[in-house]
Amino acid sequence: MNILFATDGIYPFVLGGMQKHAAYIIRNLANTEHQIDVIIPHSGVSDAQDAETQFWGDDVPSNIRFHIIPFPALPRFPGHYVVASYLYSRRITNYFTHKISTIDILFGKGYTLWHWLTTRKSTETPAIVQLHGLEMFQPAYSFKEKTDKLLMRIPAIPVIRNADFVFSYGGGVKEILLDLGKSENNIFEQYGAVDDFWLEPEPQAKENGLIRRFLFVARNEYRKGYHLLKEALQDLIIDNETFEIDIVGALPDAEKIKDPLIRYHDNLSAASLKNIKEQAEVLLVPSLSEGFPTIIIESMARGLAVAATNVGAVPKVIDESTGWLMDPGLSKTLKDTMKEIIRCPKAVLADKQQAAYHKILRDFQWNATIKRLISHLELAINDYRKRTTR
């Protein structure tokens, strides 16, 4: 196959779950026989060759080519990101229609194919898109969040409805696509995975002693739920609960709780975060909306149980065997869950941690995930060709 893979950024040039997922896909497709043209917007590199060298090091694969298309720099105004996304998608259309001759399928992350999907005249090439968690269609918990989500629906709806196929997480995410009128036959379930970095060496059994050790990792973004965690922690401190927590992610000093039980870290490298996970016992994910957070499966690969909100596709990986599911939006729910975890018998917690680790081994490794991805792309091409040649 000849695949055009359009992205709005890849890790480590851009931080974020979508960007990390895109980077993993690229690295694993390098081990296949397929030809992939990757569009990235990064301005921190001099040209595509520089980006490839920074991404791959000295071992640049022959079957993957990078193409740099700058993301428009606009002044900030309400909806500026939506406007910039459309302009970026138009640049992508103009680029690949003139400079990339052979494409069997277009694979677009986020809104990257917005312009092409809404203006295309040719029906020769199918397009599959992946909008990950579809958070813009999930409940909002503030006026600003509601406004932001309504704005994000402007590109999301035409991208979803005009795409020939959609990659989706299951659970609530798939239900959103069905509600938008997407046929189940045109939805492929596809999840993230973890690589050997997170799986090796096999994690040691956790201490699970008298002091429960929590971990929270997230960007300073309202939907990630730090404001709920902050309230819950303040209550737990007042109640003299026995716990410690590492909080990873850049936060303003005014938002930090000054207490020896709480350790704050800025954004960390994967290696540094891995070291913290070796000591942690339970990951906390109190998000208001999510797709399928990579931090969950990467933490499970290091033997952590997980307490997460029942949003998006989180129930596909977290249940009572691997952790705790919570209703979103209430600090009291988070506090009560943390109290339950603090009082959880050592053996019960150990069983959840072991189950979490083995679930990753069974269901969420990249070798199997990439094989499913390729199978879905091939099926999409064949199905599309049958439909358009009738």
Image (cartoon, helix red, strand yellow):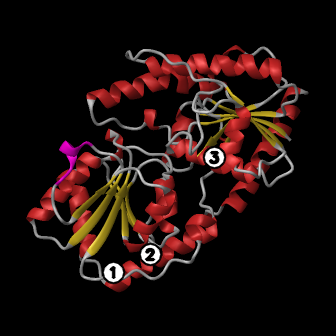
Task: Give the residue at x 36% y 68%.
Answer: 282
Q: Which residues are magenta?
A: 252-257
Task: Give the quadrant of the C terminus.
Answer: top right
Task: Give the residue at x 35% y 63%.
Answer: 215
Task: Give the quadrant of the N terminus.
Answer: top right
Nearer mark to the viewer, of 2 and 1: 1
Disc 2 is placed on an element classified as helix
Pick the front one: 262 or 194 = 262
Residue under label 2: 353
Pick the front one: 225 or 382 = 225
Residue under label 3: 23
- Residue 374, image x and y in percent? 77, 49
Disc 1 is placed on an element classified as loop
Give, as a three-letter code, the residue at label 1. Asn
Nearer mark to the viewer, of 1 and 3: 3
Q: Decide: few, some or many residues near mark 3? Use Cα within 10 Å; few <14, some 14-19, many ≥20.
A: some
Residue under label 1: 208
Query: Real-space Cα distance between discs 2 and 1?
Result: 10 Å
Query: Real-space Cα distance between discs 1 and 3?
Result: 34 Å
Q: Say whether marks 2 and 1 touch (CB < 8 Å).
A: yes
